[in-house]
Image: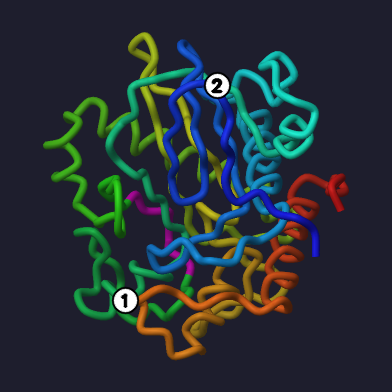
Amino acid sequence: MRESVTQTNLTLGPVRRGKVRDIYDLGDRLLMISSDRISAFDWVLPTPIPDKGRVLTQISAFWFDLLQTPNHLLSLEVGSLGLSDADAASLAGRSMIVRKCDVVPIECVVRGYLEGSGWKEYQQTQSVCGIALPAGLQQGSPLAEPIFTPATKEESGHDINISYEQMVEIVGSETAAELRRRSIDIYCQGADYAHTRGILIADTKFEWGRVDGQLILIDEVLTPDSSRFWPADQYAPGRSQPSFDKQFVRDYLSSTGWDKNSDPPSLPEEIVSKTREMYIAAYERLTGNVFQWK
């Protein structure tokens, strides 16, 4: 099995570590490094997925270019940072130099299909985040049109679904309306393209920031970590779908009897290998490129 990058320790400035990313403050810019850590059920698992960070970075870079919407990406090259040869090699393909911005404290979730927390809420209330839906929908049913279901950004634990009205209270009506419009538009662009490549994007979440008064797309975009990717030729509503994302890991963890309140178990080698294959397959199918770090 290939080596993984689970944590970086660079002497470049202050660092903040999220569940997956190590973010270094470079002054007027940030260095965002996608590690091979993987999280599920709000836990960072003890077993990394080799090259996962490279897949996330390369897919995001692909979408930033294709979608042509203002975003934070400045460069994928880290050669100007004065890194050692070893550090530069380990960070290749998994690093983005990005613009600093004021982060909007909302997860902008767009759903085109009924799954996950949306499906659970629908079963109880026939609605998702205050949006009423038709009766009789099944798990995985396509929605008549994509819906915008915001959530809070939590430093730890799970993001909390909120209504659009609650979002307006947090960011104001003008910003809320722009974020809803632009998030749905980008989801539709991405979903339409992905469908031509045999992938259904069931739902996704976007993050936004503000630079000089302009809202720009930040973080990652339409990746297997931030979205549900389903193979179109295997789609059938009424059940859990096969996927190219980390649902494979979630399903394995659920089968172990883990209580999701104590430290999570390690992943066996076959689960790690299969998950890596799924992430790479998503990249290759979406982009039409061969993953060069195989």
Locate residue 183: give its quadrant.
top left
Q: How many marks?
A: 2
Q: Of residues 114 and 10, which is closer to you in this image? A: 10
Q: Say if the magenta span includes residue 90.
A: no
Residue 68 percent coordinates (x, y): 61, 25
User: Where is 34 relative to 202, above or below?
Assistant: above
Label 1 element class = loop
Q: Amino acid at mark 1?
A: Asn
Q: Amino acid at mark 2?
A: Leu
The residue under the point 38% across, 78% down is 137
Q: Which residue is mark 1?
A: 261
The residue under the point 42% across, 85% down is 258
Residue 82 percent coordinates (x, y): 70, 16
Label 2 element class = loop
**Tag 1: Cα neighbours inside 10 Å, few (<14), some, or many (≥20)?**
few
Start-end of magenta stretch? 142-148
Q: Quadrant of the N terminus?
A: bottom right
The residue under the point 58% across, 24% down is 73
Locate residue 173: give its quadrant.
top left
Q: Are marks 2 and 1 in contact (CB under 8 Å)?
A: no
Q: Which residue is mark 2?
A: 12
* Structural distance between the alpha carbons of marks 2 and 1: 35 Å
Taking the image as shown, residue 131 lies to the left or right of residue 81, namely left
User: Where is 156 relative to 247, above or below?
Assistant: above
**Tag 2: Cα neighbours inside 10 Å, few (<14), some, or many (≥20)?**
some
Q: Of residues 64 and 132, which is closer to you in this image? A: 64
User: Where is 36 relative to 81, above or below?
Assistant: below
Q: Which mark is residue 34?
A: none
The residue under the point 75% across, 55% down is 3
